[in-house]
Amino acid sequence: MREGRGMRIAAVAGLVLCATGRVGAGAPAAPRSFAYVLQAEGLGKTRGEVVRRLADCGRDWIILDPFFEGDDDGRWAEKDLAAIRSGRAGRKVVAYLSIGEAENYRPYWKREWDTARDGRPDPKAPAWLGDENPEWKGNYKVRYWDAAWQDIMLGQLEAIVRAGFDGVYLDLVDAFETFEFDPATKDWIDHRPNPATGKTYREDMIAWVRRIADEARRRKPGFVVIPQNGVQLLEDAAFLATVDAVGVEDLFTDGNRNQPKNHVDPSLGFLDRATKAGKPVLLIEYGTKPAAVKRSTDGAAGKGFVLLVTDRQLKTLGRSGEADAR
């Protein structure tokens, strides 16, 4: 989740590639509800209380930050995840991982990368690190195709698998959009080539997500992979076959404002590819006023999406599923 992030969608014809990945009986059962909580320590006074609340929340899938910040133990323990999972038959507990930006509050971050915290990498910073995202303090753009960055993320992924999570929820998959902006024309170029790799920035992201999926499933068969945003990539058949579901924010509303038609319609065109392929669409909307919530609810119901209406900071369980709708 990134506050204030707009999604730039171009309605372009699909590029169909030879598909490999998750199809048929190996796919997980589709959820009817989900939770997305990145600051779970706010759900209770102790870790045990938080675990019990998550176990009893009634949601089919639960997305959590891999770290619990409420005590000194750091990561969720395997026993915690098992207890959360036991609260509902078939439940998936999925870890959040930002693969398109670096976060200066993560264990991999080194102080000398931006000693002054001025948002500009220092000379000792790695070559893959870019400037701080002006819309989200503490998050830095990265050259996500760089092998050194990918090695860091794969280390984080290994820890997620080892902890006992059932899958990974990949944020900043839409980071390719940053590199599609052409300063010369002051416009975005769809499928813009990356001179560093000889591929397009979209192809580099597709390859990155598929590598993550391959590495995780090699360690844990059946591991669930869910990209968030960057729905343009669904036009690639290999990408679509690789993922188990798709997360998307701010589709019908941007907070309490309706999204414009030129945002909604192209996005739905790409998401239709996911639903036709049997991939659940997890829709996260952040409206608080009744009109905005109704817009999100009606839109999700009309397309068969699984809706979560929650807070932008992802501190609460929000509302999702039939039980919450009553």
Image (tube, rainbow, N blue to C red):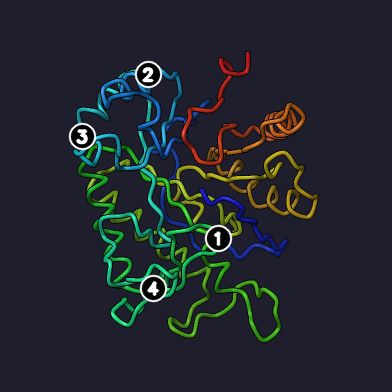
Badge 3 element? loop
Q: Residues under labels 3 and 1: Cα distance?
A: 36 Å
Q: Are marks 1 and 4 in contact (CB under 8 Å)?
A: no
Marks 3 and 1 close (CB-CB < 8 Å): no
Q: Amino acid at mark 3?
A: Ala
Check contact, mark 2 vs mark 1: CB within 8 A: no
Crowd rating for badge 1 (residues with CA inside 10 Å; few <14, some 14–19, many 20+): some
Of 130 and 86, the residue lying toward us: 130
Residue 67, labelled with which disc?
Answer: none
Say which residue label 1 marks: 236
Give the label, 3 or 1, closer to the camera: 3
Residue 209 figure quarter = bottom left
Residue 167 location (% of width, % of height):
35, 41
Mark 4–mark 2 distance (CA, rounded to whole Å)? 41 Å
Q: In 3D space, how far apart are the residues under numbered discs 3 and 2 (Cα atoms)?
A: 19 Å
Residue behind mark 2: 88
Q: Give the mark nearer the N terminus: 1 vs 4.
A: 4
